[in-house]
Image (spheres, grey):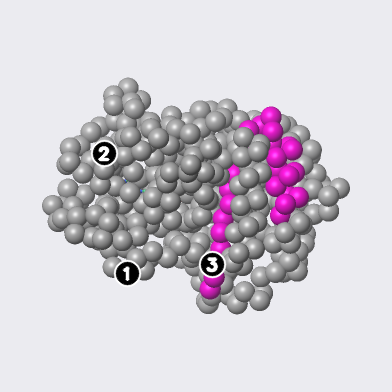
Amino acid sequence: MKPVLSWGRINDKYCNVVRADYFADPNLLTIAESSDNGMLLAHGMGRSYGDSGLNKGGVIFQTTRQNHILDFDTQTGIIKARAGITLEEILRVSVPQGWFLPVTPGTKYVTLGGAVANDVHGKNHHKVGSLGAHIMRLSLTRSDRKTVICSPRTQKKLFNMTIGGLGLTGFINWVEFKLKPIESSYLETENIPYTSLDEFFSLSEESAKWPYTVAWIDCFAPKSKQGRGIFTRAKFSNYGALDIHRDDHIATWPFVTPALFLNRFSITAFNFLYRWRPGARMKGRSHYDSFFYPLDGINHWNRLYGKAGFFQHQSLIPLERSKEGIGDLLDIIKESKQGSFLAVLKLHGPEYSPGTMSFCRPGKGVSLALDFANKGQKTRQLLERLDACVLKHNGRTYPAKDGRMSAQTFQTAFPQWTKLEAMRDPKFSSSFWRRVSQTTS
Ligand SMILES: Cc1cc2nc3c(=O)[nH]c(=O)nc-3n(C[C@H](O)[C@H](O)[C@H](O)COP(=O)(O)OP(=O)(O)OC[C@H]3O[C@@H](n4cnc5c(N)ncnc54)[C@H](O)[C@@H]3O)c2cc1C
């Protein structure tokens, strides 16, 4: 057993890390059976912030050697790849052929299997929904060694439960999905500073035809300018080369930042500099790498938050409650004096995800993603207040970003969790699942 850190560096669990070329490797289940809890969990790039990718006392099965493209039709853009491949590896092959990911999260260093298990969403959710909406078929092996091919037509229940199913329905071997055609690797972008939540909503409405939209917000703005920030909209350009991203990092965060440097003043200064940085209010062109994956440029950026690590809190509030709900969340953050460097507001669209457990399933809404340096009890209390506020507005907190929400919070927001428990592979479990599936009454 060795300690495995989650991306937020908070959840440190002793797991037995096993690498094998195939899930069907007969040793794997034997190793899992002899571990402390007898349970198994697939582990991709470990980019989930909390404990949904960890399995304390059990086996985590590292998938990244299983990174082959099995089929790629460059005429139709349909690609079939093994689940351990990263989005970065797919882009290397697909971009020069004029194809991009239909949906991408804010980092390319995630595996396809991890992206399916959390049914990831991106800056185009308002137009095309989450990744699950683009998956045509997937292959799943359960611990009884039976392999099932699932699709929206065959084995539909298992298909829907596996998309956003937190890796608990079995091992995803491969995934087939359709890429998006592009003529260039570059996007035309517009950055528009705005001064209130009302303006965010009108900009979102006005930009409904833009394929990609997102806003960075200043969570310490005065009440009269609550929600102010920079609204970005973008579309792929019709001209420019089909060149891929560079694989080196601009920099590596060299050390774990002392907590002393992370306070209200440094965050206010950062917000000021970000708001007034050159290019913050311009039309321009960006390569897909700097547009979609700005944080990937800095290796180990998660060390920025110091030894104690950080929490991410991402919530989704239904549209009809979103203005009031986001306002309430920002009030709570300001009152706590614990701000977030990265505060991202995003309109979600009506496209339903097929994923029964998908974070994005309820349709139209607004999500707010925040990072908080871990300052112990006071940060946990803040996060609990945020959870309560999200539930009050009929919203939900994203499991991929969570390492501490209570079982009650999870079960209230995801009442369908019992269906996942019923279809869960009996040999698969995670630290997250054991925490949130506890009896609450
Ligand atoms: C900088 C950054 C930006 C992000 N931006 C976004 C965003 O914009 N939108 C978004 O939705 N998410 C976002 N995320 C979250 C990230 O996309 C998800 O946590 C993703 O699931 C991580 O994939 P991974 O390969 O690292 O998987 P891991 O974190 O290792 O595992 C995640 C889950 O996938 C399961 N899993 C992995 N492989 C398999 C398999 N072969 N079979 C079955 N289950 C499997 C695991 O068991 C686990 O439950 C971001 C994360 C970071 C660090």
Q: Is residue 122 magenta?
A: no
> Nearer the N terminus, badge 2 or badge 1?
1
Q: Mark 3 points at which residue?
A: 309
SS at circle 1: strand
Where residue 250 appears, x then y in whole percent? Answer: 53, 67
Establish whether ligand 1 lies closer than 8 Å to the Cβ of label 2.
Answer: yes
Spatial CA span between label 2 and label 1: 28 Å
Q: In this view, does 353 lie to the left or right of 193?
A: left
Spatial CA span between label 3 and label 2: 34 Å
The answer to whether 348 is drawn above or below residue 7 in the figure is: above
Spatial CA span between label 3 and label 1: 19 Å
Give the magenta-colored segment's residue range. 307-333
Q: Name the residue under label 2.
A: 140
Q: What residue type is labelled 2?
A: Leu
Give 336 or 67, whichever is nearer the viewer.
336
Q: Which amino acid does label 3 sit on?
A: Gly
Q: Residues within 10 Å of mark 1 (few under 14, many from 20)?
A: few
At 36% from the left edge and 51% from the top edge, which residue is drawn? 430
At 72% from the left edge and 52% from the top edge, which residue is drawn? 332
Q: Does the magenta stretch include residue 321?
A: yes
Which of the two discs, 2 and 1, sits closer to the camera? Answer: 1
* Disc on res. 29: none
> Nearer the N terminus, badge 3 or badge 2?
2
At 48% from the left edge and 34% from the top edge, which residue is drawn? 415
Q: Mark 1 points at which residue?
A: 2
Give 18 or 115, whichever is nearer the viewer.
18
